[in-house]
Image (spheres, grey):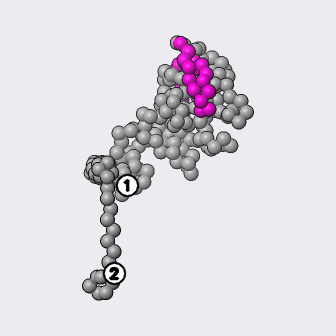
């Protein structure tokens, strides 16, 4: 009973050693990032790619590969830097190079993948050269999509990404830019 006749319940919380480590590490990391950020400093994106979400549900955009237009989608789970359908590779006149290798598609079907190098890729404000890519397996029926291919993890891993679906824009910041979050979320934002 409390001092005024109320019942006081005590709850004990037990944390495992691993939970304590992660909690302490998280607090240290959050505090460290908050200290390194300076209020009012704004980051500028390295690149921007405008996209729409089409019937496939994928963020889709127009790009230019070797001077020719293609429709691509953004795929953070796609391993390749640039992956194109075989028809798009033929249309763009990209020669295959190097040895073929076995790969698995999203349905875990094994196929032979061949590599190519595009001399240029322009996607939004990104203007890149010597982009290594690979072909996609032939797809049919429900596994097919209307785009020519995708930009994937091989390229996107080098940036801090902001997918702004309401504005239809991907903003790419330097992965070391601690001010990107402030720019996107306001001066009170910290990394957690």
Q: Is residue 161 above or below residue 119?
A: below
Quarter location, residue 148: top right
Q: Name the residue rendered at 60%, 24% in the picture.
A: 110
Numbered range of the magenta stretch: 99-124
Residue reaching furthest front? 1
Q: Is residue 138 above or below residue 30?
A: above
Q: Name the residue rendered at 56%, 48% in the picture.
A: 165
Residue reaching furthest top? 98
Residue 191 appears left or right of 100: left
Q: Position of residue 70 (x, y in %)?
A: 63, 29
What secondary structure do most residues of the magenta stretch adopt? Answer: strand
Quickly name the residue at label 1. 189
- Tell me the SS state at disc 2: loop
CA neighbours of label 2 inside 10 A, class few (<14), some (14 to 19), many (20+): few
Q: Is residue 58 above or below residue 115?
A: below
Quickly name the residue at label 2. 7
Badge 1 or badge 2: first in the primary sequence: 2
């Amino acid at each position: 009973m409390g001092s005024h006749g109320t019942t006081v319940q005590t709850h004990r919380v037990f944390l495992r050693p691993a939970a304590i480590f992660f909690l302490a590490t998280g607090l240290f990391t959050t505090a460290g990032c908050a200290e390194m950020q300076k209020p009012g400093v704004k980051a500028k994106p390295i690149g921007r790619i405008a996209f729409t979400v089409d019937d496939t549900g994928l963020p889709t955009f127009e790009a230019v590969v070797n001077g020719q237009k293609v429709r691509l989608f953004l795929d953070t789970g796609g391993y390749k830097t640039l992956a194109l359908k075989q028809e798009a590779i033929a249309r763009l006149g990209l020669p295959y190079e190097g040895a073929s290798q076995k790969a698995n598609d999203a349905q875990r079907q094994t196929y032979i993948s061949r590599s190519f190098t595009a001399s240029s890729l322009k996607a939004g404000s990104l203007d890149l050269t010597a982009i290594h890519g690979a072909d996609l397996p032939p797809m049919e029926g429900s596994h097919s999509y209307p785009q020519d291919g995708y930009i994937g993890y091989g390229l996107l891993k080098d940036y801090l990404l902001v997918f702004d679906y309401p504005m239809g824009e991907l903003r790419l910041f330097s992965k070391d830019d601690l001010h990107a979050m402030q720019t996107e979320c306001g001066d009170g934002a910290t990394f957690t």
